């Protein structure tokens, strides 16, 4: 539940945001996440979505998420919920954003989704990474910038997480050594391509069909990197129609051999899941590292 003091604070924040007296009439719990408590707020200015957390992971978690949503929205390529404001109140952090009412997929949902993601990925910059670190789940996601994808993927993604898993006893010394050998070969595995703006956590729980039947994405972990990462993440747990990939390939073909690199691109999210959820992901991580000896 949301405590009365927090609701009163939110009413004042809405009033400040809209420069108009605001009131929260009621709220409804939204289930599905495993990190934050989520609610729909019904106000005299419309309905809004709020995420609340006890701030045990990082006080800036929602600030970074809001910045990511704004960056995605500003591309004008794919729908995301616009953040209104974030803040801290009585040891809790919160993020208030546009509420997207779930709808039924349109007849062209998957085709448009693939096309829109390809257009998002046409937003590029010269270096991999981002000007600040953010979060993927409860983990800090390091985004220090590198001039090429191989170095970025090794230094900012694979090696730190492998070391953490090893220190926690989740991986053996042999797997850590194999990962180091793999990272030394990344320059010869990935073709050169300008880093693309990525959603960063594009699995089937992070999109919906909105009220108009179009795809909307949320819960980003953005950075600029190899666009095969978003594609590989979408394949990791399934739930994306083949038309999605056909449309993406039609509008922005992936580099030759991308299918052979899917498992390698999935290594990062698998390591994230290993650290967050434990040993059930260990065998898959070890298997993936072993594929690239």
Image: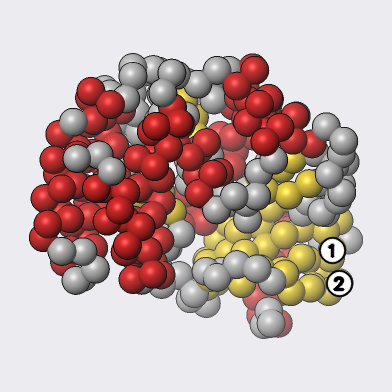
| Residue 228 spot, x, y in % from top left | 46, 31
Q: For this view, does 261 lie left or right of residue 48?
A: left
Question: How are the colours assigned in the image?
Answer: secondary structure
| Residue 129 spot, x, y in % from top left | 35, 33
Q: What residue lies at 33% left-to-right and 17% top-to-bottom?
A: 192
- Label 2 vs label 1: CA separation? 5 Å
Query: Callout 1: helix, strand or loop?
Result: strand
Query: Callout 2: helix, strand or loop?
Result: strand
- Name the foreground residue: 49 vs 20: 49
| Residue 77 spot, x, y in % from top left | 67, 27
Residue 67 visible here: no
Residue 258 tag number: none
Q: What residue lies at 87% left-to-right and 36% top-to-bottom?
A: 107
- Name the foreground residue: 203 vs 35: 203
Quarter of the figure that contains the N terminus: bottom right
Quarter of the figure that contains the C terminus: top left
Q: What residue lies at 48% left-to-right and 40% top-to-bottom?
A: 232
Residue 43 tag number: 1
Binning the other alpha carbons within 10 Å of mark 2 as few (below 14), some (14 to 19) or many (20 upward) gives few
**Where is mark 2, residue-wise?**
25
- C-beta proximity under 8 Å, tags 2 and 1: yes
Numbered marks: total = 2
- Whether residue 193 is situated above or below residue 26 in the rendered picture: above
């Amino acid at each position: 539940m949301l405590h009365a003091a927090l609701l009163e604070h939110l009413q004042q924040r809405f009033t400040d945001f809209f420069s108009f007296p605001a009131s929260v009439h009621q709220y409804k719990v939204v289930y599905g996440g495993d990190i934050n408590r989520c609610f729909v707020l019904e106000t005299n200015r419309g309905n809004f979505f709020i995420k609340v957390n006890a701030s045990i992971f990082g006080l800036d978690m929602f600030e970074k998420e809001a910045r990511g949503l704004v960056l995605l929205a500003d591309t004008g390529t794919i729908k995301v919920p616009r953040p209104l404001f974030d803040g801290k109140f009585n040891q809790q952090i919160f993020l208030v954003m546009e509420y997207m009412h779930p709808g039924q997929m349109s007849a062209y949902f998957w085709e448009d989704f693939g096309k829109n993601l390809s257009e998002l990925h046409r937003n590029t910059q010269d270096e991999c990474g981002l000007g600040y670190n953010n979060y993927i789940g409860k983990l800090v996601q390091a985004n220090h910038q590198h001039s090429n994808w191989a170095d970025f993927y090794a230094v900012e993604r694979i090696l730190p997480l492998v070391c953490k898993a090893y220190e926690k006893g989740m991986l053996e010394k042999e797997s850590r050594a194999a990962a180091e050998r793999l990272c030394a070969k990344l320059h010869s595995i990935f073709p050169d391509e300008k880093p693309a703006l990525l959603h960063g956590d594009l699995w089937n729980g992070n999109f919906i069909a909105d009220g108009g039947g179009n795809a909307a994405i949320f819960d980003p972990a953005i950075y600029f990197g190899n666009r095969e990462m978003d594609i590989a993440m979408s394949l990791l747990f399934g739930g994306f129609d083949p038309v999605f990939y056909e449309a993406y390939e039609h509008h922005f073909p992936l580099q030759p051999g991308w299918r052979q690199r899917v498992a390698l691109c999935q290594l990062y999210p698998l390591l994230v899941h290993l650290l967050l959820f434990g040993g059930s992901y260990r065998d898959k991580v070890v298997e993936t590292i072993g594929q690239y000896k």
